[in-house]
Image (cartoon, grey):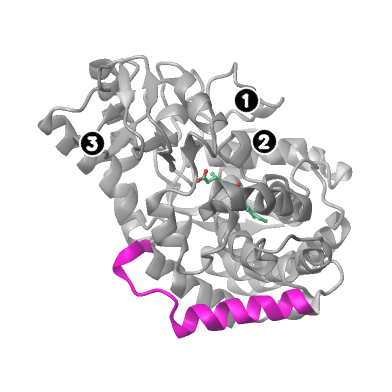
């Protein structure tokens, strides 16, 4: 039985330095805006993709282990991406050691960190409440009304301030998210999402920070109160009314929905930058606004934002048994890593790698296609994909319906390649009517 290849020590050092460490430094669970600013200035994301191309030239189809033993193995082959994602939860378990360490800070019973047995009921519960397979959720009308109100309030603020900044955008976004997930009365409950943010910062340190703190208990108690309150039109209502087996822990599924919504804010704000910069894009988006809530071009623009700058750059799986690959065997208990930016931005295989190409998303992508996996794939694919695409496209639609936007500071060039990094925290827009 040949063992899967392991990198030479210099290659391992380069992979750690150029690919894995910058991801950890940027904050896996709560982003560190300052580090992301530095990463953008140094163009670290492009460097990481080039490093992965070099590793594939060197090690072929892989996967290649970074260090000897049961360490991390990087996936290098597009077919292997589909294989790993389709093979969840066994032999490729989403509840990796890293995720259990990190997410244990605020959702120890969440589906993502569940055993295969718990997953058999927690995953369907999430799919049912989030209505994973439906482009427009049953609460779509309520969601659209919330978005309309909050974008109106945001634009009132923008008119006074004279520009649209990350701070004002994210404040409005979180009001929307709290209302949609927890209920209208949570609109101004910043404590619940501030507590979550603090816990996510702890989660960046995984096992190195103490868990089950007073803050964890306060946060989960508050979430449970909203579920018990079950305000009409909220996901909390559906959480309370959807049948659950013992051990599903319905209220512990909610933190993931709140936490993951942050990625929706980054993706939307970056999408606004793309739409306001790329020739003809804003006009095309405005032309479909009478079709609300069905906004295919805006959805595709959000997906493009997520392809160009994936918000889950590292998709992690732990192997539950020995697995065979083109170049050899990986032992049970190995960590398998899909570095999404490599597949999304590999200009040797994706002609659109560095340009805004919403047409890539004009149909559902299949396992025959090159892997573009901003929401992962297979049985553990993000069940909130449609909810977040609905919210993001509606927010963008409402913003574009009311104003013109110009990105300040030349962050994007309409004629040049799309940069490898774009920190949403530093984006600012001049607005006009
Ligand atoms: C742009 C925003 C989002 C992106 C890019 C995103 C992406 C992802 C990815 C990549 C995963 C898989 C992680 C893995 O395999 O380890 C995932 C899982 C998940 N996401 Fe999202 N997500 C987003 C927003 C949301 C929202 C808003 C919700 C809920 C309303 C949500 C609910 C979930 C849940 C419950 C899981 C766990 C699925 C499982 O373990 O079976 N996500 N998401």
Element carrying mark 1: helix
Give residue 300's mark: 2
Q: Residue 177: x, y in percent?
A: 68, 65
Name which of mark 3 and mark 2 comes first in the sequence: 3
Rounded to the nearest angstrom, the CA distance separating label 1 from label 2 is: 8 Å
Q: Residue 63: x, y in percent?
A: 33, 25
Residue, disc 1 = 360
| Residue 219 in sight from this viewpoint | yes
The image shows residue 385, relative to residue 348, as above or below, that is: below
Q: Which residues are magenta?
A: 204-228
Q: Residue 174: x, y in percent?
A: 63, 68
| Quarter of the rendering occupied by the C terminus | bottom right
Q: Is residue 23 left or right of residue 163?
A: left
Do the CB atoms of the residues marked 1 and 2 lie less than 8 Å apart? yes
| Of labels 1 and 3, the one closer to you | 3
* Residue at horizontal 21 percent and vertical 27 percent from the top: 6
Total number of numbered discs in the rendering? 3
Viewer-nearest residue: 305 or 187: 187
Viewer-nearest residue: 227 or 176: 227
Residue, disc 3 = 15
Q: Residue furthest left?
A: 10
* Residue at horizontal 84 percent and vertical 47 percent from the top: 293
Element carrying mark 3: helix
Viewer-nearest residue: 346 or 358: 346
Element carrying mark 2: helix
């Amino acid at each position: 039985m040949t063992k899967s290849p392991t990198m030479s020590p210099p290659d391992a050092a380069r992979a750690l330095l150029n690919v894995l460490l910058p991801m950890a430094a940027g904050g896996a669970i709560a982003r560190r805006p300052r580090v992301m600013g530095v990463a953008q200035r140094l163009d670290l994301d492009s460097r990481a993709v080039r490093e992965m191309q070099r590793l594939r030239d060197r090690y072929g189809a892989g996967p290649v282990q970074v260090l000897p033993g049961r360490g991390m193995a990087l996936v290098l082959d597009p077919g292997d991406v589909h294989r790993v994602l389709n093979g969840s939860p066994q032999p490729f378990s989403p509840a990796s050691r890293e995720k259990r360490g990190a997410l244990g800070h605020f959702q120890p019973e969440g589906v993502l960190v569940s055993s295969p047995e718990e997953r058999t009921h927690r995953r369907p519960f999430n799919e049912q409440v989030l209505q994973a397979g439906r482009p427009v959720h049953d609460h779509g009308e309520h969601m659209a009304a919330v978005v309309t109100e909050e974008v109106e309030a945001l634009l009132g603020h923008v008119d006074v301030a004279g520009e649209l900044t990350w701070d004002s955008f994210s404040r409005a976004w979180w009001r929307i998210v709290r209302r949609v997930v927890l209920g209208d009365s949570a609109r101004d409950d910043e404590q619940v999402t501030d507590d979550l943010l603090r816990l996510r910062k702890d989660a960046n340190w995984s096992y190195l920070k103490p868990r089950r703190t007073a803050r964890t208990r306060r946060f989960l108690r508050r979430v449970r109160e909203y579920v018990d309150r079950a305000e009409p039109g909220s996901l909390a209502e559906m959480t309370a009314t959807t049948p659950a087996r013992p051990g599903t822990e319905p209220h512990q599924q909610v933190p993931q929905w709140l936490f993951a919504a942050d990625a929706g804010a980054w993706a939307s704000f970056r999408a606004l930058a793309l739409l306001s910069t790329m020739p003809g894009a804003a006009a095309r988006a405005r032309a479909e606004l009478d079709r609300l809530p069905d906004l295919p071009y805006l959805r595709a623009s959000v997906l493009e934002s997520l392809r160009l700058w994936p918000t889950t750059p590292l998709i992690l799986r732990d192997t539950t048994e020995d697995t065979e690959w083109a170049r050899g065997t990986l032992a049970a208990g190995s960590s398998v890593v899909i570095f999404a930016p490599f597949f999304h931005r590999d200009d040797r295989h994706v002609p659109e790698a560095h340009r805004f190409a919403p047409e890539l998303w004009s149909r559902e992508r299949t396992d025959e296609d090159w892997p573009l996996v901003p929401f992962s794939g297979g049985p553990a694919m993000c069940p909130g994909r449609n909810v977040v695409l609905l919210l993001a496209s509606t927010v963008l639609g409402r913003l574009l319906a009311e104003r013109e936007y110009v990105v300040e500071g030349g962050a994007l060039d309409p004629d040049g390649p799309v940069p490898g990094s774009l920190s949403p925290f530093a984006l600012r827009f001049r607005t006009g009517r």
